[in-house]
Image (cartoon, grey):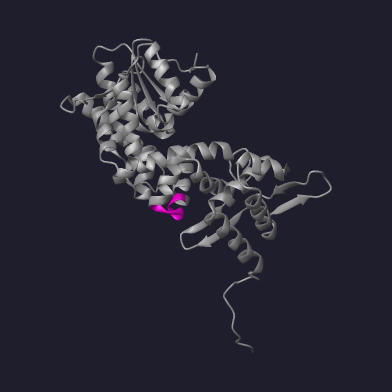
Amino acid sequence: MPAMEIPSSSIAIVDTSVLYAMGGPSNAKYQAFEEYVTRRNIAVRIPDHVAEELGESPEAYRYQRDRLRSAQDAGWLQRAEVDFTDPDVSDAIDRTRERIYSLSADDVTEDEVETTDAVLAGLAYQYATGQEDHVAILVSDSLAEQAIEDVLAAIGVREETAVIEGRTFLNSLLDDGFS
Amino acid sequence: MSTGYRLTNSADPEETLGDLLTYTELLNTPQLARLYIYILRNGPVAIEAVKDDLDIPHSTAYKYIGELEEMGILTRHEAETPTRVSVEPVHLTLDTDHGEVVVTPVLVDAIGRQLEDEDIRVFVERQGIPKLAAALHYTLRVMNGEMTQRTAANKLDVHPVEGTTVITALQTVVKEATGYDPYLEP
């Protein structure tokens, strides 16, 4: 089993960069992830914001959209609506964005910090305070990982959430012989 | 007193400009870059193995090996049968208006990868080699925890999907390069 196991029948929020790291349906990492989440009945979610970003990408990156589409068609990934009208959710997003900014290098301006990164934390909070017992968030850079983890702990959902480095997770699935 | 012509603080440029031309050739020729990195990773290695593993024609392999030899970065181990070859890790430091710029094997590897990696190929087709070098710079900074991938995409002035796609691909290149690029600090 991977070191950072995702509990059966729980929710996993993924960022698009983790999808890119999987490659397409013919790639071993994609197949391993699909098998893992299907077998364990894990519901994989991508925030609307993140999906929209992908929808607006240059035509040359249509193949990335196709990857998202194939995961949706296979039934293991769905878009999720972030409830911006919930003040606690939007507060989680604002705080994560601020945390990302404060952890970033000195030459990063506030404008260069994207809300899309912070939306992942907002959705995690929304699920963790809703019906879900456990929410995993898969990201693929250590700064986002740190910022989301810090904020989720600060707003009291540390126990219900786990922030996971997506690339390491995918590699561990391959090492464990999935697909 | 002589007031002859001179360039401020300029040392004899021969060696540096020779290096510069070498790097230019490596940066502009993906197949050569790929072959160079293969030898760097596997050398000393028999020439037969190079062409078999890279699946390139005999004549192309010898042409590129000859070029690397002319550049002065390839050594033939002639005493051995079959002859094996090895290459030196390249390293160029440029003092520029924006600070010091360093070029090492990991960039050459990234350029060679466009032949087999769709993400890198699409990026180079759209943005060119200088932008790929910038993407590598920001990939290292993302891996250092200095910024998120989306912030790096903003720094690169490309769409977030384009930025995160190439950074994801380059993270794999960097991870592997720590094994053969002596200038890359993990």
Task: Say left or right for B55 vs A111.
Answer: right
Q: Quadrant of residue B165?
A: top left
Q: Quadrant of residue B54?
A: top right
Q: Decide whether residue A160 is among the magenta residues.
A: no
Note whether residue B144 is visible: no
Tell me which residue sits at (49%, 58%) in the image: B99
The quadrant of the picture occupied by the C terminus of chain B is: top right
Task: Say left or right for A63 vs B173.
Answer: left
The quadrant of the picture occupied by the N terminus of chain B is: bottom right
Q: Which residues are magenta?
A: B127-132
Tell me which residue sits at (18%, 26%) in the image: A87
Please tell me which residue lies in front, A51 or B100: A51
In the rendering, at what x and y percent does residue A49 appear? 25, 33
Q: Is residue A29 above or below residue B135?
A: above
Please tell me which residue lies in front, B158 or A31: A31
In the rendering, at what x and y percent does residue B78 appear? 81, 50
Task: Say left or right for A80 vs B132.
Answer: left
Is the stretch drawn in magenta largely helix, strand or loop? Answer: helix
Please tell me which residue lies in front, A52 or A64: A64
In the rendering, at what x and y percent does residue B86 appear? 71, 47
In the rendering, at what x and y percent does residue A138 appear? 38, 25
